Image (cartoon, rainbow, N blue to C red):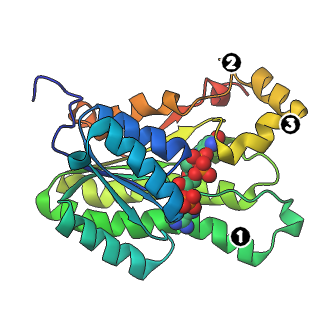
């Protein structure tokens, strides 16, 4: 065991959806702990801007970026292969890319259901499977799946998202049952309500905002920074005997019935 359990120096981490929001802060946390970072998103302008920021902060030798759609099986396979050939073997994967679609269940169209399932759940299977091929071969790797408190809460108007995140929680367990014996640790983080672009409308909605503040024992929205520490821990040697768990980072929201 090294002298610093949380040191990620020399380890390569891919964080999907790290061009902005939660993924960007998780990538910064891993970079602060010493990891080399593969930034990712679809919007190439946004990704280029985030990459420039990271290069200035951490230096060009540790920062890389790849744009691809996590729902496209061919693009995922070719980009993971390119990353491993061009940057090096992946040691850490954070499956963070995700979307929400708010509509009452009776009005939910199949196309929207499918898009939400593809982006939040199938993507983790696709990227996870491709990244795990090398990790299993090398006998080392950390996968962190970004779930949600909706796996427990199931709030109205986000049925597809809730189903996808529930599936992702169980995919975390399924990956564990097959890959833990091969040296991989796969865990999930379930964030509560975090102030990002995805939730800006909810922050602006006075009624919803006061519901959140009342419903959360910590009495505030989560920030993207709140998630970085737990992610560094789950990516590090300090969590080597943590397998298949979902860690709720929600200001206590899910302990209140
Ligand atoms: P944002 O909307 O701010 O960012 C989403 C990121 O995912 C962007 O980088 C986006 O890239 C990328 N992305 C979306 N779809 C795709 C796709 N098909 N292929 C590639 N990249 C894609 O979201 P948040 O930061 O708020 O959320 C990040 C994760 O955290 C999600 O999984 C979300 O469900 C989860 N979460 C968020 C909570 C919150 O309160 N904000 C609470 C609980 C969980 P691009 O711009 O290029 O499309």
Q: Quadrant of the C terminus?
A: top right
* In the image, farthest residue toward the top: 218
Residue 190 point in image, percent of width and height: 54, 40
In screen coordinates, is 173 left or right of 83?
Answer: right
Q: Is residue 47 above or below residue 33?
A: below
Q: Which mark is residue 217?
A: 2
| Depth check, front residue: 164 or 224 | 224
Q: Quadrant of the N terminus?
A: top left
Q: Earlier in the sequence, mark 3 or mark 2?
A: 3
Q: Is residue 121 visible?
A: no
Q: Which mark is residue 205?
A: 3
Q: Residue at x 25, y 48 (%)?
A: 60
Q: Residues within 10 Å of mark 3 (few under 14, many from 20)?
A: few
Q: Residue at x 45, y 70 (%)?
A: 68
Q: Earlier in the sequence, mark 1 or mark 2?
A: 1
Q: Earlier in the sequence, mark 3 or mark 1?
A: 1
Residue tagged by mark 1? 113
Secondary structure of residue under mark 1: helix
Q: Residue at x 65, y 59 (%)?
A: 163
Q: CA distance from mark 1 to mark 2?
A: 32 Å
Q: Is mark 1 within 8 Å of ligand 1?
A: no
* In the image, farthest residue toward the bottom: 74
């Amino acid at each position: 065991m090294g002298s610093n359990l949380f040191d990620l120096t020399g380890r390569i981490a891919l964080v999907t959806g790290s061009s902005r929001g939660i993924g960007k802060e998780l990538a910064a946390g891993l970079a602060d702990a010493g990891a080399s970072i593969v930034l990712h998103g679809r919007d190439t302008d946004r990704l280029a801007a985030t990459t420039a920021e990271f290069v200035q902060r951490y230096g060009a030798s540790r920062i890389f970026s790849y744009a691809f759609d996590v729902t496209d099986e061919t693009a995922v396979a070719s980009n993971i292969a390119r990353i491993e050939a061009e940057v090096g073997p992946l040691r850490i994967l954070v499956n963070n890319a995700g979307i929400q679609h708010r509509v009452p269940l009776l009005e939910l169209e199949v196309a929207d259901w499918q898009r939400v399932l593809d982006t939040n759940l199938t993507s983790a299977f696709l990227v996870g499977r491709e990244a795990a091929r090398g990790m299993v071969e090398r006998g080392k790797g950390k996968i962190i799946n970004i779930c949600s408190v909706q796996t427990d809460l199931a709030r109205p108007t986000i049925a597809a998202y809730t189903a996808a995140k529930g599936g992702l929680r169980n995919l975390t367990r399924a990956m564990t049952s097959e890959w833990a014996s091969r040296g991989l640790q796969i865990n999930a983080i379930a964030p509560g309500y975090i102030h990002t672009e995805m939730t800006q409308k909810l922050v602006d909605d006075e009624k919803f905002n006061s519901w959140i503040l009342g419903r959360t024992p910590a009495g505030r929205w989560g920030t993207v920074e709140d998630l970085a520490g737990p992610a560094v821990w789950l990516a590090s040697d300090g969590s080597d005997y943590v397998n298949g768990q979902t860690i709720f980072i929600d200001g206590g929201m899910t302990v209140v019935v």
